Amino acid sequence: ALRSELINEGFAFASQTDSEVIPVLLTSFLRQGLSPRDAMARTVARLHGAYAFVALFRDHPGLLGAARH
């Protein structure tokens, strides 16, 4: 469902892996003007199942976001 939603927003995917949805979803929230912290929170709120990821933010050197469930 998330993949279809993001495709409708104009995002493209290079593979069929579920893990590729996470950075695209995070990018979508950042492009909406959310801070990295808020974008991480919104991304995690949309995910289901087990996951772990780390995010680096180009516009915020030295900032590292991480989440796991």
Image (tube, rainbow, N blue to C red):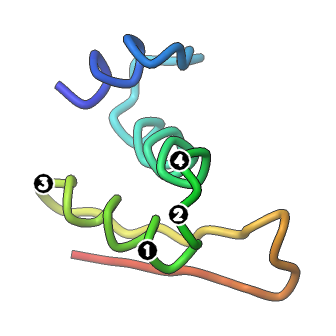
Instruction: Find residue 4 and report its horizontal and vertical position in percent.
Output: 28, 16
* 33 shown above or below 63: above
Question: Disc 2 residue type?
Answer: Leu
Mark 4: few/some/many CA within 10 Å (<14, 14-19, 20+): few
Residue 36, by quadrant, is bottom right
N-term mark: 4 or 1? 4
Q: Of helix, strand and loop, which one carries label 4?
A: loop
N-term mark: 4 or 3? 4
N-term mark: 2 or 3? 2
Q: What label does residue 48 carry, if any?
A: 3
Report the quarter where the C terminus lies.
bottom left
Question: Disc 4 residue type?
Answer: Gln
Instruction: Find residue 14 and report its horizontal and vertical position in percent.
Output: 59, 17
Q: What label does residue 57 carry, if any?
A: none
Q: Residue furthest front?
A: 33
C-alpha gap between disc 4 and disc 2: 6 Å
Residue of label 4:
32
Q: What label does residue 34 carry, if any?
A: 2
Mark 2: few/some/many CA within 10 Å (<14, 14-19, 20+): some
Residue 41, by quadrant, is bottom left
C-alpha gap between disc 4 and disc 1: 11 Å
Instruction: Find residue 37 and report its horizontal and vertical position in percent.
Output: 50, 80
Instruction: Find residue 23 and report its horizontal and vertical position in percent.
Output: 53, 47
Mark 3: few/some/many CA within 10 Å (<14, 14-19, 20+): few
* 31 shown above or below 50: above
Report the quarter where the N terminus lies.
top left
Question: Disc 1 residue type?
Answer: Asp
Residue of label 1:
38
Question: Disc 3 residue type?
Answer: His
- Depth-wise, is mark 4 or mark 1 nearer the camera? 4
- Marks 1 and 2 close (CB-CB < 8 Å): yes
C-alpha gap between disc 2 and disc 3: 21 Å
